[in-house]
């Protein structure tokens, strides 16, 4: 494990794991999470910092898990300088050799799947299954990146000039700054990092200030592998902090690419700062995802997709289902099925696998949920499954809310906004053109789906006259993407693509090379220039 130089990290005795079961204590211990953690690391050592401390409380039980020191200017500068030095060495490693290191990271994640998945669940609040699923996604992207390390292809072209060869190459960019959101506290880092690493880039990660311990855990896991492989210090660094630190990264000309995942508000700020210095940004922002339920849908199958999409991760996925656009002929039948299903949902401790819905991330998120409900009621929304905040034994953190459903009309303002909570809106439609117009009629463009067994409708939904989103599914819900496809969305979702397909190109710069092996120097377009 990496050398610790932060004072006060001697005891593994933070409140939460003193009070909890032995297994809870052990999972934190095995990830090297301490009571007080430095939040700044270059990969080989944890740095001292005079930055503010961030206390991580679990939304599961409200207890303090541990404390992290955020980066100050001095430690941030050290990290960026080390990363710059590391890039000079790392980019010279053959890509398949970099891929071999990533393969070992995947193996390490297999070994740490249980404790890391548990930490994700405990610090963020998603169900244990989803916590493990998130780590599985990290393993999957490692596997993908290993293969990619031998496939960073460019095209070759035929030159118009005799005795000339023309081709393109892809070169690494440099430092990739990675800013992530709380709701996927580990997977989004790995989507970016594993691709960037095989591409020859070095990474500086700022996790969400709401899930700093997940950042510490990942840094410890990767450092173990890096040390074994003599990877230069600074190839993967960690800087903890909030908005201000993110702004330093967005404005830093040492960082050619900033990959930022979070709210549209954050993305607009990052895009403006990076754009002003003509840097590159990769933005993965908010969604307002809808499922169209056709009269030709398999309603039982649709029900599972809709309920999982709306209440999974307590409605805190960027791809969560927020709107159901239901054909008028089956509206009442499907509504009844939904209401029945919602009444069967078990809300409670996400580490208990009998529960379907865990807490929201914090009390601020609960306030946003309540504000959206108030607004929806004021605008005329009719709640058919009532909202509420749960109180009493097991709900002491104050973060547990009831997933709810409201009948709304397409022109209501609240429906245009992403509320990061389990609030589901039902809208009736008459024909497919109208349904697609409703689906597209919001500022966001992340994920969309249509439930239908009718081939014509399905193809229309997927055609250029159909969904305007980055993701469009048929007979699958809006959430739960696989790593093999490029992930991201249009409009206010930011336009970025991460993970599979050819998303790796964003992490590299393209260079066109023309070589003249003839004895003349003919100019392109037949231009004559004789001396
Ligand atoms: P957030 O915007 O509050 O914070 C996200 C990250 O950005 C954090 O690390 C935060 O510190 C940082 N940040 C905030 N303001 C910044 C600024 N001005 N400059 C630089 N950095 C800044 O988002 P959140 O509450 O953590 O996450 C929820 C949001 O993230 C939702 O809107 C959700 O849809 C979105 N999200 C999108 C995707 C996607 O792939 N499209 C994935 C996950 C989450």
Image (tube, rainbow, N blue to C red):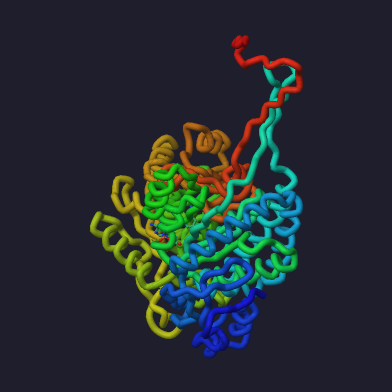
| The N terminus lies in quadrant | bottom right
Q: Vertical placement of 436 versus 31: above or below?
A: above
Is 397 left or right of 219, judged from the image as shown? left
Residue 276: quarter of image: top left
Name which residue lies at 33% across and 64% down: 368
Foreground pick, 78 / 468: 78
| Residue sitting at x 63%, y 15% | 523
Residue 168, quarter of the rendered image? top right
Measured as percent of width and height from the top left, residue 111 is found at: 71, 71
Position of residue 341 in the picture relative to residue 406 (left or right): right
Which image quarter has ligand 1? bottom left
Q: Which residue is at 55% across, 84% downward?
A: 9
Identify which residue, 475 or 389, lies in the foreground: 389
Q: Can you say whether 56 is above or below 84 in the image?
A: below
Give coordinates of residue 499: x percent, y percent: 60, 50
Asked if one can make out residue 327 in the rendered structure from this viewpoint, the answer is no
> Can residue 174 be seen in this snapshot?
yes
Q: In the image, residue 195 lies at what x, y percent?
A: 63, 51
Task: Classify the position of the C terminus by image quarter.
Answer: top right
- For image coordinates 60% across by 68% down, the residue present is 219
Q: Residue furthest front?
A: 531
Q: Position of residue 46 (x, y in %)?
A: 57, 73
Quadrant in the rendering for residue 127: bottom right
């Amino acid at each position: 494990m990496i050398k610790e130089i932060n004072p006060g990290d001697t005891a593994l005795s933070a409140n939460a794991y003193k009070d909890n079961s032995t297994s809870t204590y052990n999972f934190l211990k095995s990830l090297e999470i301490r009571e007080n953690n430095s939040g700044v690391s270059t990969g080989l050592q944890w740095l001292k910092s005079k930055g503010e401390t961030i206390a991580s409380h679990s939304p599961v039980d409200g207890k303090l898990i541990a404390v992290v020191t955020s980066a100050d200017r001095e430690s941030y500068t050290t990290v960026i300088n080390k990363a710059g030095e590391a890039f000079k060495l790392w980019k010279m490693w053959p890509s398949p050799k970099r891929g071999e290191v990533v393969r070992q990271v995947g193996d390490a994640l297999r070994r740490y799947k249980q404790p890391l998945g548990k930490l994700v669940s405990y610090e963020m609040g998603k169900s244990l299954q989803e916590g493990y699923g998130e780590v599985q996604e990290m393993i999957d992207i490692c596997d993908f990146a290993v293969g990619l390390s031998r496939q960073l292809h460019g095209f070759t072209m035929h030159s118009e000039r005799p005795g000339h060869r023309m081709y393109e190459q892809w070169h690494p960019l440099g430092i990739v700054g990675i800013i992530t959101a709380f709701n996927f506290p580990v997977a989004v880092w790995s989507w970016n990092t594993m691709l960037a690493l095989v591409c020859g880039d070095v990474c500086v990660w700022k996790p969400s200030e709401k899930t700093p311990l997940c950042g510490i855990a990942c840094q410890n896991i990767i450092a173990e592998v890096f040390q074994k492989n003599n990877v230069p210090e600074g190839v993967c660094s960690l800087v903890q902090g909030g908005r201000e630190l993110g702004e330093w990264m967005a404005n830093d000309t040492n960082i050619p690419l900033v990959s930022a995942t979070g709210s549209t508000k954050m993305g607009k700020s990052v895009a403006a700062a990076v754009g002003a210095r003509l840097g590159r940004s990769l933005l993965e922002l908010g969604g307002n995802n809808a499922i169209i339920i056709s009269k030709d849908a398999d309603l039982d199958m649709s029900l599972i997709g809709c309920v999982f999409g709306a209440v999974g991760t307590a409605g805190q996925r960027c791809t969560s289902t927020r709107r159901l656009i239901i054909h008028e002929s089956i509206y009442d039948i499907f509504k009844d099925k939904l209401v029945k299903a919602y009444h069967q949902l078990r809300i409670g401790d996400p580490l208990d696998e009998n529960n379907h819905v865990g807490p929201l991330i914090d009390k601020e998120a609960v306030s946003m949920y309540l504000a959206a409900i108030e607004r929806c009621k004021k605008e005329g929304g009719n709640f058919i499954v009532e909202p509420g905040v749960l109180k009493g034994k097991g709900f002491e953190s104050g973060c547990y809310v009831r997933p709810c459903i409201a009948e709304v009309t397409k022109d209501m303002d609240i429906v245009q906004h992403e509320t990061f909570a389990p609030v589901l809106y039902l809208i009736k439609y008459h024909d497919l053109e109208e349904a697609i117009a409703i689906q597209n009629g919001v500022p966001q463009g992340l994920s969309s789906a249509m439930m239908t067994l009718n081939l014509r409708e399905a193809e229309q939904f997927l055609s250029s006259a159909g969904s305007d989103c980055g993701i469009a599914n048929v007979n699958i819900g809006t959430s739960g993407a696989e790593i093999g496809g490029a992930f991201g969305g249009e409009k206010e979702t930011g336009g970025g693509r991460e993970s599979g397909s050819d998303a790796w190109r964003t992490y590299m710069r393209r260079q066109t090379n023309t070589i003249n092996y003839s004895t003349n120097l003919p100019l392109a377009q037949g231009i004559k220039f004789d001396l």
